[in-house]
Image: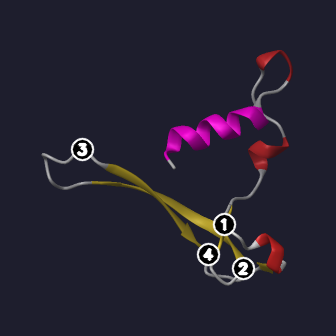
């Protein structure tokens, strides 16, 4: 997944009346699901750039809080 895909997807939820931006999704917390089915809140987002001048790659890294806050029921753990 690329950042542009995430932006396009979230844009569908944040567009309000008359093209205005912002709604409840704008203030939603972001979680990642672990392999054990727990949700961990994102505490930091980092952008990594290559140190090699010939490499223009950039990646976005979501760093979790490492607190197993909520376990999902087994039916929700599948990767679709």
Counting residues from the start of the chain, the first of labels 3 and 4 encountered is: 3
Image quarter where the C terminus lies is bottom right
Report the mark closest to the observer, 1 or 3: 1
Pointer 4 residue: 65
Query: In the rendered image of this protein, does residue 48 appear above or below residue 19?
Result: below
Residue at 77% x, 18% y: name it: 19
Instruction: Give the distance between the C-alpha atoms of the residues marked 1 and 3, in whole angstroms.
Output: 30 Å
Badge number at residue 79:
1
**Residue segment shown in magenta:** 2-14
Residue 25: numbered disc: none
Q: How crowded is mark 3: few (under 14 residues within 10 Å), some or many (20 or more)?
A: few
Q: Is the magenta stretch mostly helix, strand or loop?
A: helix
Mark 3 lies on residue: 56
Furthest residue in direction top, as rendered: 18
Q: Quadrant of residue 29?
A: bottom right
Return the residue at label 2: 37
| Residue at the spot 67% in from the left edge and 82% down from the top edge | 67
Look at the numbered disc 3 and give the secondary structure of its residue: loop
Which secondary structure, mark 1?
A: loop
Give the Cα separation between the discs numbered 2 and 4: 15 Å
């Amino acid at each position: 997944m690329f950042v542009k895909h995430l932006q396009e997807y979230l844009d569908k939820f944040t567009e309000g009346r008359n093209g205005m931006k912002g709604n409840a999704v704008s203030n939603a917390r972001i979680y990642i699901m672990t392999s054990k089915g727990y949700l961990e809140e994102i505490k930091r987002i980092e952008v990594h750039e290559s140190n090699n001048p010939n490499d223009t790659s950039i990646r976005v890294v979501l760093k979790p809080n490492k607190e197993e806050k909520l376990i999902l029921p087994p039916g929700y753990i599948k990767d679709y």
